[in-house]
Image (cartoon, rainbow, N blue to C red):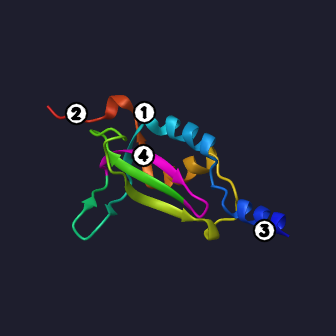
């Protein structure tokens, strides 16, 4: 009986994206810049406008996929990522997500900006 419970709990605690695969997916997004397709309201006083350039990364838990953004001028290590979107495990039909699924999700909210298009401040 304890073994059965362990199996049930271990199945429930699996991440939507496995840790090793999540690292690869975040490496894929690491060098890319995206523009917001619509404004994002993080709080009553903090709104990032449509077209704002951001970097993104993904976090995965057993119950949530989180798409986080941070300013392009900051490094991911020093920035506090802002939650731009999430998917709740109960809302999805899949138990595992991969890069193709994440790309589809990202493309609904962000537009990839080619390096030559980036605006630089002078």
Q: Is residue 113 above or below residue 1?
A: above
Res. 22 mark: none
Q: Of marks 4 and 1, which one's residue comes earlier in the chain?
A: 1
Name the residue tied to disc 2: 120
Compute the Cα span from label 2 to label 3: 56 Å
Q: Residues within 10 Å of mark 2 (few under 14, many from 20)?
A: few
Q: Specify the quadrant that holds the N terminus.
A: bottom right
Determine whether 9 is above or below 107 in the image: below
Q: Earlier in the sequence, mark 1 or mark 2?
A: 1
Question: Looking at the image, is mark 4 or mark 2 earlier in the sequence?
Answer: 4
**Looking at the rendering, which quadrant does residue 30 occupy?**
top left
Q: Which residue is mark 4?
A: 56
Q: Residues within 10 Å of mark 1 (few under 14, many from 20)?
A: few
Q: Which mark is residue 31?
A: 1
Residue 107 point in image, percent of width and height: 50, 50
Distance between mark 4 and mark 1 Cα atoms: 9 Å
Depth check, mark 4 against mark 2: the one in front is 4
């Amino acid at each position: 009986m304890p073994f059965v419970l362990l199996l049930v709990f271990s199945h429930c605690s699996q991440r939507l994206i496995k840790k090793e695969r999540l690292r690869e997916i975040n490496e894929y997004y690491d060098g890319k810049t995206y523009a917001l397709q619509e404004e994002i309201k993080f709080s009553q006083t903090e709104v990032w406008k449509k077209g704002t350039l951001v970097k993104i990364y993904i976090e995965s838990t057993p119950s949530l996929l989180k798409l986080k953004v941070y300013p392009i001028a900051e490094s991911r290590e020093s920035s506090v990522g802002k939650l731009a979107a999430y998917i709740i495990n109960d809302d999805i039909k899949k138990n595992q997500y991969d890069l193709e699924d994440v790309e589809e999700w990202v493309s609904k909210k962000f537009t990839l900006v080619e390096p030559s298009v980036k605006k630089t401040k002078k």
